């Protein structure tokens, strides 16, 4: 018992490899002032994975129409607000506190995305009702101007995910794969809304199906990395590989340090 307690007390002082750090925090190892990473728990599994997966699971089914799902996911508006926006914003704040800039930006922006998506589907905010030409606010959902406007939201989320995909090349293959599948998913969703605005319902449906297939792959990759992070956090006797890239694509500071050492 005494030996176990001693190990628990000294765990915070142990250093971890860059590969393990990247797997747990989804960010290359960096130096920050203070001991916050040893004081607070790791927020990454909470908001990157648990939140992302809970919302992605519901977001996958409505474009694919699985078991009759549809309505742009309006039945899961509460999930978007709480499992999506709230949980992810809280996790992003946690990443900010412990000095993980990249996860903080990624999860904060996706938290804002899900809050915005949930608000769009909430009648109180009158997002679609403002486009209605009748006494029924829901008629605004069929107005071309609404669909074309909402398409730009999906389009620029795709651009954002493309930037994240490039930045994720310093983390691991699974994380890169998540963004690599989100880019075409958002592109197809943008195309679907543009086609709805043009009245091409059949093509819009096909694009939604492709988007659903892409987000399904995103979801599976997310479950994999979620399991991998938890196993690493608990120091399990077996681990899941995520394809560490931090040692392949070296940082500018590391290259400069190696250059200085070589010159010396």
Image (cartoon, helix red, strand yellow):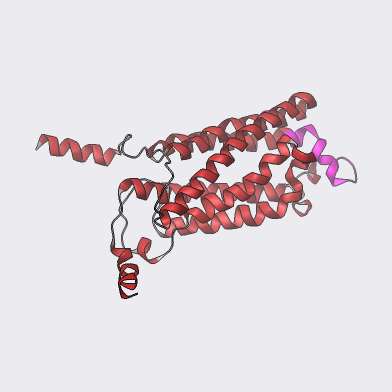
Q: Identify the residue at horizontal 30%, vertical 49% (top origin).
A: 17
Viewer-closest of 67 and 108 = 67
What stretch of residues is rendered in magenta?
133-147
Residue 142 in the image, given as x and y percentages of width and height:
82, 36
Q: Is residue 120 left or right of residue 234?
A: right
Residue 33 image-quadrant placement: bottom left
Q: Is residue 34 left or right of residue 131?
A: left
Residue 72 in the image, given as x and y percentages of width and height:
74, 41
Q: Residue furthest left?
A: 264
Check if residue 201 falls in the magenta segment.
no
Q: Is residue 200 visible?
A: no
Residue 249 in the image, given as x and y percentages of width and height:
33, 34
Q: Identify the residue at horizontal 61%, vertical 37% (top origin).
A: 215
Q: Quadrant of the N terminus?
A: bottom left
Residue 8 sits above or below residue 182 on the image: below
Q: Identify the residue at horizontal 75%, vertical 47% (top origin).
A: 74
């Amino acid at each position: 018992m005494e030996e176990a307690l001693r190990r628990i007390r000294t765990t915070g002082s142990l250093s971890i490899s860059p590969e393990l750090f990247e797997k747990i925090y989804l960010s290359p190892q960096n130096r920050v002032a203070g001991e916050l990473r040893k004081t607070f728990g790791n927020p990454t599994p909470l908001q990157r994975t648990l939140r992302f997966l809970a919302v992605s699971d519901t977001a996958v089914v409505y474009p694919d129409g699985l078991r009759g799902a549809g309505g742009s996911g309006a039945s899961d508006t509460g999930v978007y607000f709480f499992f999506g926006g709230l949980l992810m914003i809280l996790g992003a704040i946690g990443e900010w506190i412990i000095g993980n800039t990249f996860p903080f930006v990624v999860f904060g922006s996706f938290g804002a995305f899900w809050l915005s998506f949930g608000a769009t589907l909430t009648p109180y905010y009158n997002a679609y009702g403002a486009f209605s030409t009748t006494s029924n606010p829901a008629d605004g959902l069929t107005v071309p101007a609404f669909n074309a406007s909402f398409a730009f939201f999906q389009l620029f989320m795709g651009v954002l995910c493309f930037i994240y995909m490039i930045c994720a090349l310093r983390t691991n293959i699974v994380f890169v794969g998540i963004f690599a599948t989100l880019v075409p998913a958002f592109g197809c969703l943008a195309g679907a809304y543009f086609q709805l605005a043009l009245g091409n319902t059949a093509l819009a449906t096909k694009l939604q199906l492709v988007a659903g297939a892409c987000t399904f792959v995103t979801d599976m990759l997310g479950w994999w990395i979620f399991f991998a992070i938890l196993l690493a956090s608990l120091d399990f006797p077996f681990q899941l590989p995520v394809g560490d890239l931090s040692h392949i694509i070296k940082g500018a500071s590391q290259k400069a340090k190696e250059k200085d050492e070589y010159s010396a």
